[in-house]
Image (cartoon, grey):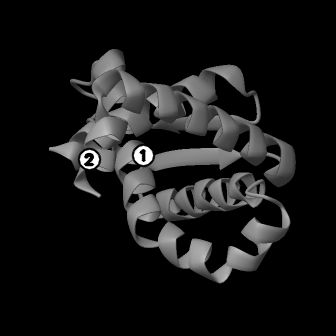
Amino acid sequence: MRFILQVLISALALWVADLLIDGFSISGSILSTANADGTMNSILTYLIVGLIFGLVNAIVKPIVKLIALPAYILTLGLFTFIVNALMLKLVEWISGITPITVTIDKFFWDAILAALIVSIVSFFGSLLTGGREKAENKR
């Protein structure tokens, strides 16, 4: 249940990043064009990208964080934005095998800004749903 909630929050965060950043866009057609509703198609697109993003964060990100631990220490945690931008670039690459297109124009600025917005929206989304408190109580 917690993973599904995290996918929903990620989808919302990616939608906000898509709205605010010109160089970051998510598009695609999940439903067939014969009976496709534009709103439902958009919602499904963001949910699938949120699922991909959640899987990348659950599987790949811990490994990258472990390898990049010295960079985290040297930058006092600011390297987190670079790692989050790399995770978005990985989502962009993975989406290439799906009917969904995630596009990041300029790696440094667009990916960093998108990662920052996704992090902020995800943080507040988790606070509103109580996800952070539940995760801390399990530790």
For marks 2 and 1, give the CA distance.
29 Å
- Which of the pair 99/84 is nearer the observer? 84
Question: In the displayed structure, does residue 45 sit left or right of residue 134?
Answer: right
- Which quadrant of the figure contains the C terminus? bottom left
- Which of the pair 21/40 is nearer the observer? 21
Query: Contact, CB < 8 Å: mark 2 with mark 1?
Result: no
User: Which residue was labeled with disc 2?
Assistant: 137
Q: Residue at x 61, y 29 (%)?
A: 17
Above or below, 89 against 24 in this view is below
Q: Residue furthest bottom?
A: 67
Task: Return the disc, 2 or 1, that comes first in the chain's sequence.
Answer: 1
In this rendering, does residue 26 appear at all? yes
- Which quadrant of the figure contains the N terminus? top left
Question: In the displayed structure, does residue 47 sit left or right of residue 124?
Answer: left
Q: Amino acid at mark 2?
A: Asn
- Which of the pair 14/133 is nearer the observer? 133
Of badges 2 and 1, the one in the foreground is 2
Q: Residue at x 64, y 82 (%)?
A: 67
User: Which residue was labeled with disc 1?
Assistant: 49
Q: Position of residue 49 (x, y in %)?
A: 42, 46
Element type at marker 1? Answer: helix
Element type at marker 2? Answer: helix
Q: Amino acid at mark 1?
A: Val
Q: Position of residue 84 (x, y in %)?
A: 63, 54
Q: Residue at x 71, y 46 (%)?
A: 104
Q: Position of residue 136 (x, y in %)?
A: 33, 47
- Which of the pair 14/22 is nearer the observer? 14
Q: Position of residue 73 (x, y in %)?
A: 76, 69
Above or below, 2 against 9 in this view is below
